[in-house]
Amino acid sequence: MLVEQSHILVPPVRLPERDVLAESARRSPLFDRAVRLAGLLGTGRPVDATGILADEPLREAAAALGLRGSGYDDEAVAAWDFGLALGVIAIRDDEDGRPTAVPGDVLGTLDGLAADEVLTLWRAGLDAVIGEAEFDDLLTGSDDPYADDPFADDPCAEEAAGPAPEWDLAGERAYLDAILRTLYLVAVLESWQPAAGGAPEPLPLPVLAAVLLTPDDPADHPGGTHGTGGFDGTDESGGARGTDDLRGVEDADLVAEVAALADRLAALAPTGLLEYTPPARPLDLPFDGPLEDADPGEAAYGTVRLTALGLLVVRDRSLATGVAAPTLGDLRDAPATALLDVLPGYPPAAADAEADVWLAAREPAAAVAELLTVGVVGAAGATSAVRAVGAVSAEGAVSAVSAERAEGVTSGRVTPACLAVLNRLGGAAIPALRAAGAVPALRPFAEAALADPALAEAALADPALTGPARRAAGPAQRDGVPGSVAPAVQHATGTARP
């Protein structure tokens, strides 16, 4: 049965095969650097008190990998930490009890790992980076004002300095989740737009910042520091959120938000989670008017979009918290009622693709029978009659329904979603629909599905008519081109989008 949608649903995401994702994980900068760094350790290299290569060995390793410098915030240290999380680098005591870095056991098994095992390893490294990013950004600024303070434990000094800053780990995680959720929804929604060709454009950082600063309910806008509003994909009317919703963002907040985003995205980009272009110049706005018209060089302030690995991660994180994040094909084995419930809320291309996957998993006769079983409303006594259409022949269907005819079957209608999915079958649906037309109780529905106005009129005028007199194609099926699910459904339910 059709459920009208007051909001656009999150459409299904299209993900590559697991082997492709695993190869992307292997090629991600930190994964690749970590593996190469592990290969340079030989029989072991000394580490300092923090568990990182000593300065000189680290400098040599960075040079060998073509990385920058040897400071604790450079790419070499990031690759080192990633390698520890992967297990390709291990810290063990040497014969003298000194901590030494050696290749981890995982390093020798990498080539033989299955795709899911590679992805699990990569996720371990990603989780370490995310945890580090959350911890580093807990304070205002990048440095802990109490670090390396010789008087930090002095009660008098503590009283003079005032209370230590509060660390809001939950708030930082919520902020990171809001960033990733917003990027996910933008990517998935745009991927189904015809102009996108399945690949959304990178999102300018000022736009992402403004969306994060604009909560779903403007009355909840706290102002000031970065927010966790995010993008829910819709406005109250079910349409996509536009720039009118973002005009209340203060310029100072926008500048601060872009700076906060730049720090976090720069840390996450080498993991392969996202594609990030840092700002080429400082954000010295104000914007005047809608954001997309503000500056033709807006991309110079930085852009970002999720990779396929990023889409996978955000989807998994969403599902783990009970948030819907469907994948194309999730409904392949679902009952027709589940399919017909969600299609009206999908963009047209997504609705068509989901319907096609569902139909491809069934024989046409079985698909027609199942669709009509749940897609006919207001027709008492028709359920088993429709199931009979899936029998071996039209004669079998008519025979199976004879016993029910005495109980009476009232008139009903086929829902727009059902008709639209049947149209996706094209000519393959005709034999099963004609079999349904041989059953008086189902004749009007079969004729509606065949989309022959003249024949539907004849069926209403002549109760003795036993079925369609000729093969007919619906308006969306003329010239042999299957119609689209969503426009027909959205027109009938009033959820059409311009």
Image (tube, rainbow, N blue to C red):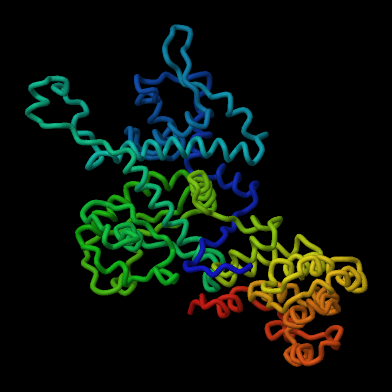
Residue 94 on image: x %, y %:
47, 11
Q: How many marks?
A: 0
Q: Looking at the image, is 289 positioned above or below residue 316?
A: below
* Residue 381 located left or right of residue 73: right
- Residue 436 x %, y %: 82, 75
Q: Is residue 128 left or right of residue 39?
A: left
Tell me which corner region of the image, top left, top right, bottom left or bottom right, holds residue 169.
top left
The quarter of the displayed image where residue 407 is located: bottom right
**Vertical relation: 480 (above or below) 400:** below
Which residue occupies the foreground of this view, 415 or 45? 415
**Which percent across, then down, holds residue 176?**
37, 47
- Taking depth in this image into account, of 304 and 48 the one nearest to the observer is 304
- Which of the pair 185/125 is nearer the observer? 185
Residue 360 visible to the viewer: yes
Q: Give the answer, above or below, for where 478 lies relative to 172.
A: below
At x 53%, y 71%, the residue is 193
Q: Tell me which residue sits at (52%, 39%) in the image.
A: 123
Outermost residue on the top side: it is: 96
